[in-house]
Image (cartoon, rainbow, N blue to C red):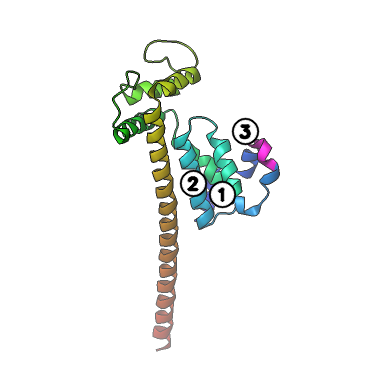
Amino acid sequence: MKARIQSLLPSRERLHDMHWLRWLAPYLHHPRLWHINRKGLALGLALGVFFGLLIPVAQIPASATLAVLLRANVPAAVASTLVTNPVTFGPVYFGAYKLGEWVLQAEPSAASPRSGADANAAARGGAATDGAGGSWLADFWHWITDVGTPLVVGLAIVASLTGVLVYLAVHWAWILKVRLAQRRRRHQRLGHARAQRVRRS
């Protein structure tokens, strides 16, 4: 199981080559940051998902920094920030805005996105919904400042709940996997013992 997980995560060399993480290089030598165990993996994935959902920029440096401080698995923290990408960005942020609007009981903003596709276009670098040009980052920042508090509240709720659920899910999945493996080995030993008794009889 550990080998399979390791193959899915970015290598130590790849992380050391990331210019965003070069300033962390002196702190990346602790073995617990690379070792795959239940707590380190669960915490690393939870941190990556949390920052991946919460903030649109600097997700990798933020998740890696906190992973170093909390001794979580750094590759897992970095890889799981990809929970938001050009495909999922629009629906996630649109849904978070609607959730924040519902929690705050706010009136819909005139600048609120009409659909997840609008926000997704901005995330991919496309034109804003009003046809204005400019970089995707400028369009995105304009959109963020327009929708304001509901989006921030919605993202905080979504990121926190998802991070906790990921942490618990990894813990439970790991425990279940270990127990199933122990049960399988126990059955194999019992089967082997029975076969030996039959041969002796």
Q: Is residue 166 magenta?
A: no
Q: Residue at x 39, y 45 (%)?
A: 161
Q: Main secondary structure of the magenta part?
A: helix
The image quarter containing residue 139 is: top left
The residue singled out by tag 1 in the image is 73
Is 103 left or right of 136, judged from the image as shown?
left
Q: Give the mark nearer the N terminus: 2 vs 1.
A: 2
Q: Residue at x 36, y 33 (%)?
A: 96
Q: What secondary structure is found at the residue carrying circle 3?
A: helix
Q: Position of residue 158 (x, y in %)?
A: 38, 39
Please give the range of residues in magenta.
17-25
* Amino acid residing under circle 2: Leu
User: Crowdedness of circle 1 by 10 Å Cα count: few (<14), some, many (20+)?
Assistant: many
Q: Position of residue 133 (x, y in %)?
A: 45, 10
Q: Position of residue 112 (x, y in %)?
A: 34, 22
Q: CA distance from mark 2 to mark 1?
A: 8 Å
Q: Give the mark nearer the N terminus: 3 vs 2.
A: 3
* Amino acid residing under circle 3: Trp
The answer to whether residue 34 of the structure is visible from this angle is no
Q: Give the mark nearer the N terminus: 3 vs 1.
A: 3
The residue singled out by tag 3 in the image is 20
Q: CA distance from mark 3 to mark 1?
A: 17 Å
Classify 125 as above or below 26.
above
Q: What secondary structure is found at the residue carrying circle 1?
A: loop
Classify 82 as above or below 120.
below
Q: CA distance from mark 3 to mark 2?
A: 19 Å
C-beta proximity under 8 Å, tags 2 and 1: yes
Q: Is residue 23 magenta?
A: yes
The residue singled out by tag 2 in the image is 45
Is 68 left or right of 53, judged from the image as shown?
right
